[in-house]
Amino acid sequence: MAGLVLATNEALGGGGGHPLVVIARFIVEFLAIHPFQDGNGRLSRALTALLMLRAGYEYVPYASIERLIEENKLTYYHALRTSQTATQIDPAQFSAWLLFLVRVLQTQKRILAGKIEVERSILNLTDTQIAVLDHVEMQGRATASSSAAALHLPQRTTRYHLGLLSSRGILEAHGERRGRYYTRRMSAPTEARADEESRNGAILAAILERGGTVTRGELLALVDAQHADHRLVGSLHGRRLAHLRRNDKTDRSALTARGREVAEQYLFARRLARTDRPVVPPSGG
């Protein structure tokens, strides 16, 4: 550990390559040394945050690496084990872990950017929009008609403000037109949210493998294969961060840049997770 700490400090002090490469190498070595009987994995995440702060990545405390690791445990362990095995032969061969870490940091940054976008949107709300938002938060879920009645507003006006709050990412719309209701968009995704992202990733990856476009019928078949509600089709075509964009002339939907990115991340994680032998998590991970 003394040698690892010394080498890392020297590398981060200058001339040791990109800080993220140095930090990734430190974590691989730290978990291989396994200096404590328990808690090495949790400590490695804390040390990642500390080293990134030292390297100037000041955003790190505001989005959780720990949660992202928990949601991608299989890929995490496989990338770690692959790199630890490879570095026994060649100390420079830890690319599997480096790529995993960079993907996690990319997702972490995107989550934080979303939080900032939501907070900025809230600062610019009108009194009426704040009243609508407060009503939805108080009820947990609300429709345009119930919100209009409670706030004594015209239903058309209420629907407009609900749509605006939804487009800004502050509220989340569920369902299409008749029966649509709204809930507060949560900053911290739950386990259900992680399952939803994995399901969406599988659908988008299948579309990417088909050339990046899909008919409505083919899309419905992919949704059925994931045992998802057909309302997901509308969600994937949503106005904000749309994953698919429909061409009304051809009746085909094409991946957006965001949809392609999600598909590529899913395929990347799937490739890393493939192994001929079971991946046994190292103790304390």
Image (spheres, helix red, strand yellow):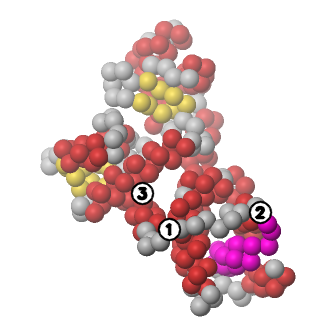
Quadrant housing the N terminus: bottom right
Q: Is residue 23 shown in magenta?
A: yes
Residue at the image position 56 percent from the left and 48 percent from the top:
114
**Residue at 44 percent of width and 24 percent of height:** 181
Per the rendered image, the range of residues in magenta is 20-38
Q: Quadrant of residue 57?
A: bottom right
- Which part of the image, by quadrant, shows the C terminus? bottom right
3D distance between C-alphas at marks 3 and 1: 26 Å
Tag 3 residue: 262
Mark 3 vs mark 2, CA separation in Å: 34 Å
Task: Name the spot of residue 76 as percent of width and height, x first.
Answer: 57, 65
What residue occupies the far right of the structure in this picture?
2
Q: Dividing the picture into quarters, in which one does residue 17 lie?
A: bottom right
**Helix, strand or loop status at disc 1:** loop
Magenta-colored segment: predominant secondary structure: helix
Query: Can residue 56 be seen from the camera position used here?
Result: no
Which disc, if any, is residue 38? 2
Q: Secondary structure at mark 3?
A: helix
Coordinates of residue 97 in the picture (x, y in percent):
58, 73
> In the drawing, what numbered circle is on residue 278?
1
Circles 3 and 1: CB atoms closer than 8 Å: no
Identify residue type, mark 3.
Val
Tell me residue 211's x, y (percent). Answer: 24, 63
Whether residue 278 is situated above or below residue 188 in the rendered picture: below
Mark 2: few/some/many CA within 10 Å (<14, 14-19, 20+): few
Give the mark, 3 or 1, whose residue is nearer the N terminus. 3
Mark 3 or 2 closer to N-term? 2
Taking 227 as reference, is 272 above or below it?
below
**Residue sitting at 43 percent across and 47 percent down?**
241
Q: Is residue 18 magenta?
A: no
Task: Look at 20% across and 48% down and name the residue there.
Answer: 218
Q: As shown in the figure, which amino acid type bears the numbered disc 1? A: Pro
